[in-house]
Amino acid sequence: VDIRFAGSGREYNASSAIEVSGVPPEMVSITVYNSAYNGINVTDPVGPVYIYNSSISNNRGYGIYVNSSDGGVHVEGGHIAENGGDGIRYFGREYLLKDRKNVFDLCTLPTTSSQTFPLLIELQQDIYTANRKDCEKYIYTQPGYVLTVNFLIIRTNNNGTAKIAVHDGISSSDRQLASFPVFNSTKPQSLTTTRSNVFLSFSALAFTDTYALIRITSGVDKWYDLNVTDTNISDNNGRGIAVDNLRSRLGVLRTSVSHNNHVAGIHVNNGAGHVNITESRIAFNVGDGLNVTYAGGSTNVSRSTLSSNEGYGAAVWYNETQLPEFLSFNQSAVVQYSAIFKNVLQGVYIGNFSRDSTVNITGNEFNMSLSSAIEVQTSWKENGGILNLFIGHNQFRQNKKLGVKIRPAVNVEALIEYNQFVNNFHGSILIKNDPLELFEVLPSRFVIRNNEFYHNQGTFVVNLGLSPYSEQHKILFTWNYVKHNKISEPFDVDRITKRLIPRSRVAAPVVVSSDNAEIFRNIIQNSQSQYEIGAHLQDQSQSINCTYNWLGHSEEEKIYYRLFDRKERYNLARIEYIPFLLHSSYPGATTIMPTRLFVPEFNPRGGSSVGGEVEGLENLRPGEYTVERDINIRPEGRLNLEPGVTLRFPPGVGIMVGGKLEARGRRPNDILLTLQEEVIEEESTTIFDDPETVPAGPSLAKS
């Protein structure tokens, strides 16, 4: 059936080309285009909605609009493009009491083998009843099917006086799917069993007016609000797929959502439930590829491509404070085996947790993102639940900013393993807490192991730092390979002769800013970087454990000058690197250097450079010296400056006297401490022509 140029009535009032109210027909192989308003409008359907192999395009309103309290909308094999509004819009409205038919009471419901689904069950307590009500019932379907419990209406005159529990089985001893007190107008997400039985229990105090209506459906899978399969949704002026007030599940399978022009390709706004995106392509959308903003549930993106979107590739926001009526029973996000590249903002952004949550990002390729590939926002709430974070077996290549960013890193237990970071332009991993007292009491545990970091650029490869004085924070960085990275200070370009001289934020492949971060048994070798490990912890009384690592050399003298710590700047923590590995490729090697054999000199070989820690007696003879590192006179040290000594300090370098400094001259300005002046070599701007094209000048002949 072809429907063209529809939607303009006798009085030129715009209407949808197909309008359905009540029992919807099965729509197969229809074409709707150039309508004056929506292509298909389904309002208050009784039963599921099926649209197969249909083309809906060039309509002035939505391609497909469904307003339903039941869900069950299935779109398959369609082409929905170039509509003036959203391609598909599903709006979940509230279930009305007048819509009830064939309702059973939980306490009197008979359980039979010939049960008909869907099954409407009411749970109620009357305000005039003097007895407490307790009802239990188990319901079953045929083997191989599962049951989905949908909560349609919940009302009470006294919050918290009733309780509903759902178990995955035939009794209360089976696994509990959910248990929650009844609050007025709450909208819990749907629950699905893993077997063919469900056990329901309801309890309510006496003299309370409580009413709840649930619907139980049976099928091979979880009941869905909207399911889109094998469909092309593109070039719509609104969103590609838009779902408001999700209650059960959104499924998108083998579908292309591209070139849509508002908010996101797929947008879930409000509600609580499951979002499942599988084997789909979401690309070139104005805004995000996938944007899920709701109270909670589980979001799963697997074997899909999210690319070239002008916002986030995939963004999941848990917003319980602004959506208190929606009740979710879990908060989890899974992104697996997908390709995520060339998005303007973060490839994957997940945040706003407020309870125990799970995030699993596994087996993906993050390439050429213009911002960070992954950013996870953790909860700041005390006793707000723990985020269990797993990032593993991913590849991060040529991202313009960070590979993984977690800031702040609190209320989290994370495992980051078996990832590969190659050719990223501004670092690979940033795990950091800002200096707030609030963070010190919140737990944080990280294990970063068996990762590979090659050929990255920027001011660091790995930047690790939690709250430095917190006993509840811990980072273990172990069995990682950090090799062949080119790390330099900001503005340090080959064509520029001046660069920033680091004070407390040195550029290094591995940067540590708290003493509760341990760098243990890693292979770290970066010949194109000035340092291997840099300390950002500004507390000279602290030390950072960086033992049992291969640090680019087997000679301690070379290793010593590849570490930036207290010997360079007096206010930094000390890096403990002894013992260090003597094996350049195996972190678990037992060949180590267990003792210190190198003693640094304050004035190496009597040359013109000085710097470092003074722990004994040091004398400087007359002459000019360049101070390459902070002069740090320890409490037991003494430095004598003889007359005629000039110390030239580069910017950012100074002197700290904790012991004794003796500087006795014979006349004014006999001992001089001054700023080192660098001579800037300016490139010549004279342009010489090819000498063959320049005419020869007059010559002077000898007489």
Image (spheres, rainbow, N blue to C red):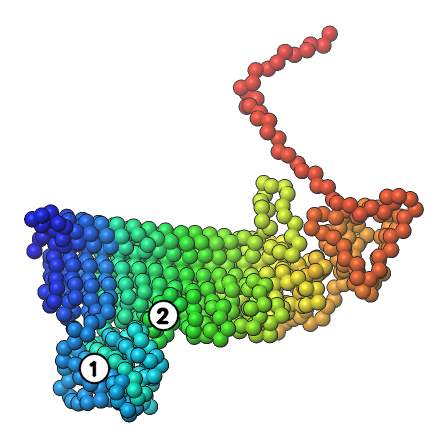
Q: Residue furthest front?
A: 128
Q: Residue furthest top?
A: 703
Residue 482 seen by the camera: no
Can you say which quadrant of the picture contains the N terminus? bottom left
The numbered dot on residue 78 is none
| Residue 226 image point, x, y percent | 23, 66
Residue at figure coordinates x 29%, y 50% from the top left: 261
| Residue 377 image point, x, y percent | 46, 64
Quarter of the image holding residue 470?
bottom right
Is 591 situated above or below 674?
Answer: below
Give the CA distance from mark 2 to mark 1. Answer: 25 Å
Residue at figure coordinates x 19%, y 49% from the top left: 60
The numbered dot on residue 121 is 1
Q: Is residue 370 left or right of residue 35?
A: right
Front one among 335 and 246: 246
Secondary structure beneath disc 1?
A: strand
Residue 641 seen by the camera: yes
Who comes first in sequence, dot 2 or dot 1?
1
What's the residue type where badge 1 is placed?
Ile
Quarter of the image holding residue 703?
top right
Residue count near mark 1 (Cα–Cα under 10 Å), binned few <14, some 14–19, many ≥20: some
Front one among 689 and 392: 392
Front one among 463 and 700: 463
Q: In this view, does 159 lie to the left or right of 7?
A: right
| Residue 262 image point, x, y percent | 30, 52
Secondary structure beneath disc 2?
A: loop
What's the residue type where badge 2 is placed?
Pro
Residue at figure coordinates x 29%, y 87% from the top left: 207
| Residue 329 image point, x, y percent | 35, 76
Q: On the image, numbered disc 2 is attached to which residue? A: 324
Residue at figure coordinates x 38%, y 65% from the top left: 322
